[in-house]
Image (tube, rainbow, N blue to C red):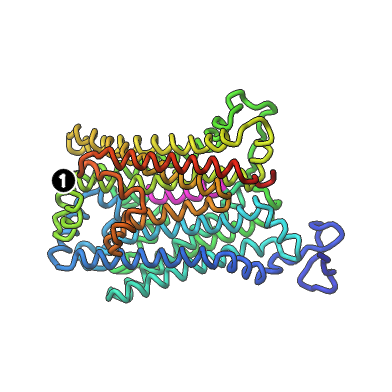
Amino acid sequence: MTLTSSTAAPSTTPTAGRAGGVQPSPMAGFATVLRLVVRRDRVRMSIWVVAVLVIVVMGAASVIDLYDTPADLDQYARIAQADTAVKAMAGPGYGLDDPTSGAVVMNEVQLFTLVALGLFAVFMVVRHTRDEEESGRAELVRAAPVGRQAALVSAIAWVGGCGVAMGAGITVGMVMLSLPVPGSVAFGAGCALLALFFVGTTALVAQVVTTARLARAVSSGVLLAAFLLRAVGDMGNGWLSWLSPIGWAQGVRAYADERWWVLAVLLVITGALIGGALTLSGRRDLGHGFIDPRPGPATASPRLRTPLALAVRQQRGIFFGWVVGIGALAAMMGLLADQADELMSNDAMAEMFSQMGGTPTDAFLATSVLSSGLIASGFAVSSVLYLRSEELGLRAAPVLATPIARRGWLLSYLGVALVGNAIIMLSSGAIAGAAYAGATGDVDGMVAVLAASATMIPALWVMSALSVFLFGLGPRLAMLGWVAVAYAALAGYLADIFDLPSPVRGLSPFEHVPAMPAEDFAATPVLALTLVAALLVAGAVVAFDRRTVEGG
């Protein structure tokens, strides 16, 4: 493509950036790139926006229906304010001194909404920054008269704009539920600014690190640290919560003497993060970061001679992050189980949990194990997606050109996922059981939680096997594994709210796992899930053997 001269295009300035020509102004082509981003994301972004809004509004509606009398509100407030573990999992409980429906909704819904918006920002910004550079598409775009800042600014504008739209939608949804307008605006504004904060954070991280995988890991780590800081702060005197952006968003105190100035803090820090990202973007080479991977040794370690050893090496850091994150959640749930009788003293909640059978404590522990399993399904899919990254990054074809067998390469990455799933569930079960035993002295309960966690493993194997089967059909189909994760979460958490029929719920493998310890162990569904996983793996091997590898 012919570049215009500096005299014909006043918006360009001569630099040494392009041989024999001139460099466009930093924002040249912004509108065109933004249209391309919107076109690529029109389906994916619609799913994100609709899913978040539906889940948040339906969740708030269910909370309002659940605590619909002054006695229920007072009872909830007493439990939430008295138990530090509840504060760690829900929030500081602003407005619960004189509880209203809005205050209870915030304590039940706000935290997971903020975490969901943070994850949304992380994944979508990396998709339009580091993913583009790794795939080579960013270089093709920059070969046209497009400025070096246009792509980053378009990603920030698009993802940030959608985050603001979700915040506005949340405000409208809360008002439609007859909650006070000022509190609804405060809730929506806090959500929007939290999304913008992680847009800025991820954009900055994407300039510092070199790979998309590391950018996601670091940005997600910031989100996890924000969650843990807020949890520890809310369990204590509260000052640590002010070191967390999640704590700031909650500090707006929606439906409880709103503090609008906190929004200004989030806005200023977000502006600084975005400004830092833009500054660093103009000072680095395309495809590189300020922290490039250090060169490896000239000779590989003998321990890396097999595809399995390489797969383990690639995933060990992220795997331990999953173990720590799910373990922290399991510990909190184990501590909360001691309060199950009080938490379920509300008639509607007791009726909901009674469907699982057993005592309220058993039902609560079963729900906790299910929560750990649903979250761990994220690792089950993401671990298998390393296969996709290796193939689309054109690293698989050179490996498979050696005597390494296709099946061995495929099953090595799958093996890491399957073993990793088992370790995550067993460790989380041990942690939750130990926390419960420490709070109650019930050692038998610890064993029951560990057994329940072990029973959840075949469902995770099905999720991994489904992802590898999709990959066997084609690398781009593998991303549909995330649809299975989203559906499992929908069936696990919102099936009653949406009144899903049993056959539809049954599409989730987690629906077939015995809800231990509330239910007795049943071998048939566990064996059936294991068989389904094996059949999917066999199908993946056959499909992968028959197709062409990208770059091969």
Please tell me which residue is depicted at 82% across the width and 66% down the height of the picture: 3
Q: Which residue is mark 1?
A: 358
Q: Point out residue 458 in the picture as x, y percentages from the top left corner.
A: 36, 40
Q: Point out residue 526 in the picture as x, y percentages from the top left corner.
A: 32, 40
Principal secondary structure, stretch drawn in magenta: helix
Q: Can residue 214 be seen in this snapshot?
A: no
Image quadrant holding the N terminus, namely bottom right
Please tell me which residue is depicted at 82% across the width and 57% down the height of the picture: 16
**Residue 228 painted magenta:** yes
SS label for mark 1: loop
User: Toward which corner of the image does residue 347 lie, by quadrant?
Assistant: bottom left
Please tell me which residue is depicted at 28% across the width and 56% down the height of the picture: 92
Q: Point out residue 329 in the picture as x, y percentages from the top left corner.
A: 33, 45
Of residue 535 and residue 194, the one placed in the foreground of this image is 535
Relative to 536, say whether 77 is above or below.
below
Query: What residue type is disc 1 on?
Result: Gly
Please tell me which residue is depicted at 54% across the width and 55% down the height of the picture: 202
Of residue 319 and residue 467, the one placed in the foreground of this image is 467
Q: Can residue 61 be seen in this snapshot?
A: yes
Q: Point out residue 439 in the picture as x, y percentages from the top left corner.
A: 20, 38
Image quadrant holding the C terminus, namely top right
Of residue 125 and residue 188, the one placed in the foreground of this image is 125
Residue segment shown in magenta: 213-229
Q: Is residue 84 left or right of residue 38?
A: left
Q: Is residue 381 left or right of residue 7?
A: left
Mark 1 neighbour class, 10 Å CA radius: few under 14, some 14 to 19, many 20 or more: some
